[in-house]
Image (spheres, rainbow, N blue to C red):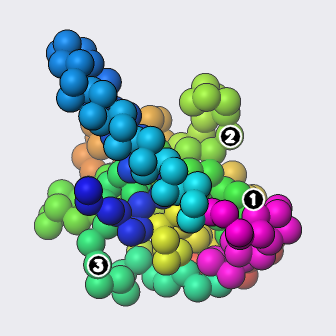
Amino acid sequence: MIRYANARPGYEVRVLLAGADIVARHSKQQPCEDVLVQIQASYEEYKTDLQGRDLRVANAMGFRKQELSLAVPVASRTTAFRSDDLLGSEVRTPGNVALGSVDDIVMGPEGGKIAYFVVARGGVFGLGERHVAVPWDQFKVSQNLHILVLDTSKDAMDQAPRIIKGRFVKAEPFAQQTAKADAYWTAAAKTPRTD
């Protein structure tokens, strides 16, 4: 069984459950049952790993602050990023204030590298969300990839240029669309942050 050391908790179980669903749709009962047995084993291993740990909320908050303080700029990482590790990741300030979550990854037209994260803010179950494009190099990443750190404030995110989901690169040329975001975040990086 392949282990994903940097994957979010439950990743392995979710992947196996999706596999069991696919096998079941093809009426393959025995392979489906085999995958379900592996899911149970993975879950039991996860439970055993958690036993004996002090998982009170106060300790979790201390852990989160420690993880945020150890975040490093994305550009300085020497390992590759997986899209399934980044999509849905929380975005927080260094002071642990929630800013949103990564809704989309935008690749630049030159070189095919990550150019922006589209951060979804507000809303309930995707309804009423506001989307903000933030340049990739503005982020820091926690060691376990569970949290992305952005040195800004909620007010700055509220004032950032919004984009229409799904139309970031379609409505007009990429360079025109990104000019506003780049100008805003360049200025924001020079402005002192207040949490």
Q: Is residue 151 visible?
A: yes
Residue holding disc 1: 155
* Disc 3 element: loop
In the rendered image, residue 105, in percent from the top left (x then y), is placed at 35, 52
**CA separation, marks 2 and 1?**
13 Å
Compared to 95, does 46 lie above or below? above
Residue located at (30% from left, 28% from top): 33
Q: Amino acid at mark 2?
A: Gly
Task: Inspect the magenta stretch and tell me whether residue 56 lies in it.
Answer: yes
- 110 above or below 176? below
Label for residue 96?
none
Residue furthest to the left in view is 111
Looking at the picture, how far across and down is residue 6, in whole percent?
41, 68
Please name the residue that numbered disc 2 is placed on.
122
Q: Is residue 166 left or right of residue 153?
A: left
In the image, which residues are magenta? 50-68
Nearer the observer, 192 or 128: 128
**Relative horizontal placement of residue 14, taking residue 162 as reference (left or right):** left
Confirm whether residue 168 shows in the render. no
Q: Nearer the viewer, mark 1 or mark 3?
A: 3
**Residue 57 image-quadrant placement:** bottom right
Q: Nearer the viewer, residue 163 or 106?
A: 106
Q: Secondary structure at mark 1?
A: helix
State which tag comes first along the sequence, 2 or 1.
2
Mark 3 vs mark 2, foreground winner is: 3
Mark 3: which amino acid? Answer: Thr
Q: Secondary structure at mark 2?
A: loop
Q: What residue does disc 3 label?
A: 79
